Image: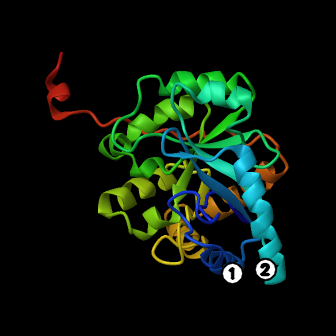
Amino acid sequence: MIDIHSHILPGIDDGSKSMEQTLKMLKLTEKDGIKAIVASSHFYRGCYENSCDDIKKLLEKVKSRAKEENIDVNIIPGQEVMLDHYSLEYYKSGKIGCIGDTDYMLVEFPMMNMPENALDIIYELEIRGVHPIVAHPERYRYIIDNPSKINEFLDEKCLVQVNTGSIRGIFGKKVKNTARVLIKNEICSFIASDAHSTGGRHPGISSALEMASQVNHDIYMYMEKNCERLLKNQLIDPVSGRIREKKRIFSLFRT
């Protein structure tokens, strides 16, 4: 099992604040039985512009320290890319990229409003061979208000990653319920920690995965297969589930 989303690199975004905290996070990762973790630091234009090269350089320092501490976790370079109208240009220049040597890119969108050109950006990346994984959509206000909105991403062959913290309820009841809906409807391709520290948003996925298994008995097997395929850069099956849009009461009286 691998954790495809973490902010484990020190001092470059809102995640780990120091090398010491990073090492503690890696030890928690190892204790949870996770063999590999993606260091997916933010790439957010105008805020956290951590390029692929920046991440790889810092990652080598972290790997060296982890080896000194006898921590047996494979750390894979990646990014959590906030997609916007500059993303295609950044991808072409190599500033943003995919997880390790794969064609899978972890992407996110603003929490409150879905950009009008979001699906266009995804399409442009996909025709260049990129497979987007949408990070924590259960936290997006427009998905919480209308879960069927996720279908628009699925129709573009996006995969979906749900946060462990969402499953555990640390972001509130609405986010927890939305995560449950995505898992129950077989829309969740990955569960990941999105770890930022050793506190509330800590590494580890086993407890949340156990909770998710109570909603969808096949989630562990499905996730294990997806993690294996991602590491091998093999094609992951598109999400087949969809969420039916709830009809508003007034629509029931339309002729």
| Badge 1: residue crowd in 10 Å (few <14, some 14–19, many ≥20) | some
Please say if 140 is above or below 218. Answer: above
Which residue type carries mark 2? Ile
* Closer-to-camera residue (90/160): 90
Does residue 26 appear to the left or right of 175 in the view shown?
Answer: right
Tag 1: residue type?
Answer: Lys
With 8 as the anchor, is 162 left or right in this view? left
Query: What residue sits 14% from the left and 24% below the top?
Result: 253
Question: Residue drawn 46% across and 66% down?
Answer: 165
Residue 154 at x, y = what percent? 55, 34
Kindly check if marks 2 and 1 are in contact, taking CB atoms under 8 A apart as contact.
yes
Residue position marked by numbered label 2 in the rendering: 71
Q: How is the image coloured?
A: rainbow
Q: Indicate whether 253 appears above or below 35.
A: above
Residue 225 makes an appearance in the image: no
Residue 203: percent from the left, percent from the top?
A: 59, 72
Q: Which mark is residue 27?
A: 1
